[in-house]
Image (spheres, helix red, strand yellow):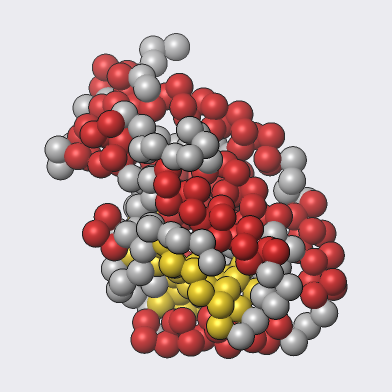
Amino acid sequence: MQHFEDITYEVDAATAVITINRPHRYNAFRGQTVEELIKAFKTAWADREVQAVILTGAGQKAFCTGGDVKQRAETGDYGPTESGMFEIGYLHKVIRDIPKPVIAAVNGVAIGGGHVLHVLCDLSIAADNATFGQAGPRVGSFDAGFGSAYLARVVGEKRAREMWFLCKQYDAATAERWGLVNAVVPADRLLEEAKTWAADIAEKSPTALRFLKQSFNADTDHQAGLSNMAMTALDLFTASPEGQEGAAAFAEKRKPDFNRHVLSH
């Protein structure tokens, strides 16, 4: 078994449970976190005993709050990795491509890139105290790939645009009403419920599930091209004065000043 620092990985019966374990940063991910998540999903993919995967966060406060903006403000990037790259786009691809259903157990705040992760999972179960939203435009970031285009498939164009343009947060009941999550349960029953769903999945034909997941994905696979382009654009944007202002303001706990970046044409 591989050693992980930023996540935990365990197998319970036919279910792999992957937990983002950075509660001191509200489970925000740095480059190393993303790399470890990719390894964990590949481990679950290769394990013939595993038939479903649960993705959750450590602690009671956060599922995941996206990229570690404090890290970006401190170093200008998301920290060192084995590959030398920040592979969040590849993590998105692995979550979609693993031929086993992935269940997000949203145990608290799911914001920004963390919100994108739960949306990309096949199923989402939320604790009744969970909150959801996008924050990119507030902190000098965006996801113009799966995080927006696929989100619109899930909740509709108007809701997706509202989430990105206003950067508001929504409670679990609203998320369920919008179809953003499949179910809402008491926080102390969240992981138990997710494991029950995973156990139900484990009773089904794995080949049938594989074909079904690939069929569902086929309709939106073209969005991967948008995602690749968006990730390249984001790399350029975060290095710009506008992107740096968002990260600096977040780290300094002040409102960002984007006024001088408003386009006149």
**Number of marks in picture:** 0
Q: From the viewer's perspective, is residue 33 above or below residue 59?
A: above
Q: From the viewer's perspective, is residue 198 above or below residue 67?
A: below
Q: Which quadrant does the C terminus fall into?
A: top left
Question: Is 247 situated left or right of 157 in this image?
Answer: left
Q: Could you tell me if residue 68 is visible in this image?
A: yes
The foreground one among 154 and 104 is: 104
Q: Which quadrant does the N terminus fall into?
A: bottom right
Q: From the viewer's perspective, is residue 230 above or below residue 159?
A: above
**Residue 19 image offset from top left, x and y in percent:** 44, 67
Q: Name which residue lies at 71% across and 83% down.
A: 202
Quarter of the figure with residue 120: bottom right
The foreground one among 248 and 25 is: 25
Q: Name which residue lies at 79% across and 52% down.
A: 218
Q: Name which residue lies at 56% across and 32% down.
A: 230
Question: Is 26 situated left or right of 190 in this image?
Answer: left
Q: Could you tell me if residue 55 is visible in this image?
A: no
**Residue 171 image offset from top left, x and y in percent:** 37, 68
Quarter of the figure with residue 70: top left
Going by the picture, which residue comes out furthest to the top?
A: 265
Quarter of the figure with residue 245: top left
Q: Name which residue lies at 82% across and 79% down.
A: 205
Question: Is 232 situated left or right of 80 in this image?
Answer: right
**Residue 49 image offset from top left, x and y in percent:** 70, 78
**Residue 52 image offset from top left, x and y in percent:** 65, 74
